Amino acid sequence: MNINTEHLHYWMEAIRQSPDPIRTLDAFWRGQIQSKEWLIKNLRKHVNQHVDIDIHGGWVGTLASMLFQSSVPTKNIRSIDIDPTCQPIATMMNKQEEIVGKFKAITADMCEVESTADVIINTSFEHITQDQYETWLSKIPNSSLIVLQSNNYNIPEHVRIANTLSEFKEQSKLSVIWAGELKLPKYNRFMIIGKKL
């Protein structure tokens, strides 16, 4: 996908203003961007009207910015992350949309947020336990399209990985509409698009 120069300006400003620019730059590693491009490409096939989107574990707002610049018909996006340092960075990353009321970054525990969006994205599946996930899932409407990503990258901050796509499907407890696997240099990324059973 192409990033327009106005958005790129805000990306650079977000990095510059970040209290920890090196950590913020982690959001731009090749695997991170490829995973988001892959999500957008496949989500587009399942969205036929303008939608409100909630991103749980939205981090510094990169996915939101990429969605706004994509062909996914997007009305509004909320980016939710438990880390309070993410909110100002995500707001700057999406400044154009924030100014016109289409974007809002929120500091909150995803397991405590009530979501009513048409599309609910969680790319932080490996960072929450099964019990936390089930609490999170219980607060999502049956009508929402759910997008989940996980991986098989076994590092300390990943409290629960999936070793295979089949295992990820079992962990998700969703009615799966689409599922796929993206092979990256250090790990495989898994993705499911589905709805609550």
Image: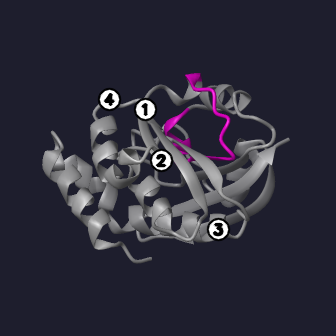
Rendered view: 190 above or below 100: below
Give the quarter of the image for residue 181: bottom right
**Residue 37 location (% of width, % of height):** 49, 69
Q: Nearer the viewer, mark 3 or mark 4?
A: 3
Residue 44's label in the rendered image is: 3
Q: Residue furthest top?
A: 112
Query: On the image, numbered disc 2 is attached to which residue?
Result: 102
Identify which residue is drawn at 45% across, 26% down.
108
Q: Position of residue 71 (x, y in %)?
A: 56, 71
Asked which secondary structure carries label 3, the reply is helix
Q: Which mark is residue 173?
A: none
Q: Nearer the viewer, mark 1 or mark 4?
A: 1
Report, in whole angstroms, how far the alpha carbon at label 2 lies from the one at label 3. 19 Å
Amino acid at pointer 3: Arg
Q: Which residue is mark 4?
A: 84
Position of 7 compared to 123: left or right?
left
Residue type marked 4: Pro
Residue matched to label 1? 106
Q: Dot 1, crowdedness within 10 Å: few (<14), some or many (≥20)?
A: many
Residue 196 in the image: x percent, y percent? 80, 41
The span from disc 3 to disc 1 (Cα, nearest Å) is 25 Å
* Kind of residue at disc 2: Lys
Q: Residue at x 40, y 61 (%)?
A: 32
Front of the two marks 2 and 1: 2
Instruction: Give the mark nearer the N terminus: 1 vs 4.
Output: 4
Query: What's drawn in magenta, residue-wise?
Result: 112-128
